[in-house]
Image: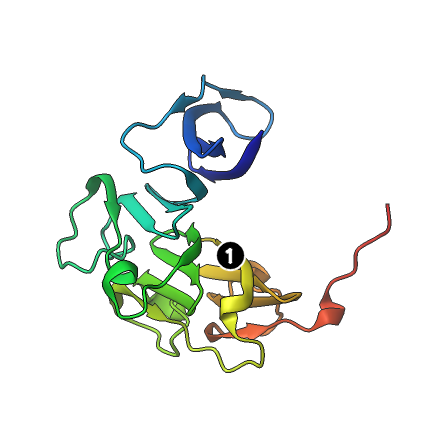
Amino acid sequence: MATHVACCEDTLALVHGGTVYAGKLTGDGLQVCTLSVLEPLPSLPVPVRRIGAGKGFLGITTADGELYTWGRNLYGQLGLDFASRANVTTPTLVRQFVFEPGRVQVHDFAGGWDHSVVITDHGVFACGNNSNGVLGNDEVQGESHRFYPVDWKGGTPLHKASCVACGDGHTVLLSSGSVITWGVKDYQCLGKTDSYHVQRPRALPPGLFRVKKM
């Protein structure tokens, strides 16, 4: 049984038995969609706990709480803390969380268009392109090749967050029953109706969501 899944462009990847399997999707993505045979990805540390996908890049977290990333790295979205913008062809350990004092456990990873977000036991961190406040640090430009904490002023610590998802310039986080968003405002993808980008994470009001009983 698959325990986690991620999609990016024409690729589907899932975690089964601690191993990552991936395959290509063909078709228009709406009415016609064919999946090739899923094959295990080689050279990955196992067991893998979760997988996340961005535009041309992937990240996995292991059962030991380590983070590995690879793929497109134009804005430093792999979080590998070096200046090169070259693509990374093999899964590479994000050493920041391993060798800092009081080793940090990474629980979840998500990739967007050109940024990444992780949940750790020390909080939530982001890296990559910071256009329009995507990194949640109260700034609207620049980039980061290293994961930095998002600027959260809410009540519940973000290390209690359970999962994260990223889109084209925005992030959605689930933490202790609250939905927290930040980034670009386009198409009301942040669950809000005003005309401003959100440069710092903020919780959406509970009354915004109405779920019909099945």
- Please say if 120 is above or below 149: above
Which is more toward the observer, 37 or 194? 37
- Please say if 44 is above or below 144: above
Q: Tag 1: residue type?
A: Val
Residue 4, percent from left and from top:
52, 39
Q: Which residue is painted at 22% across and 52% down in the image? A: 74
Query: On the image, which quarter does residue 130 sit in?
Result: bottom left
Q: Which residue is painted at 27% across and 57% down in the image? A: 79
- Please say if 61 is above or below 205: above
Label 1: few (<14), some or many (≥20) within 10 Å?
Answer: many
State the quadrant of the N terminus.
top right
Disc 1: which residue: 164
Query: On the image, which quarter does residue 90 sit in?
Result: top left
Residue 180, percent from left and from top:
57, 68
Q: Residue furthest right?
A: 213
Which is more toward the observer, 25 or 151? 151
The image's colouring method is: rainbow
Q: Is residue 119 visible?
A: yes
State the quadrant of the C terminus.
top right
Q: Residue furthest left?
A: 84
Residue 164, percent from left and from top:
51, 56
Which is more toward the observer, 135 or 1? 1
Which is more toward the observer, 102 or 134? 102
Q: Residue furthest top?
A: 37
Q: Is residue 195 visible?
A: no
Determine whether, in the image, residue 115 is placed left or right of residue 84.
right
Q: Which residue is painted at 79% across and 55% down in the image? A: 211
Per the image, label 1 sits on a secondary structure element best described as strand
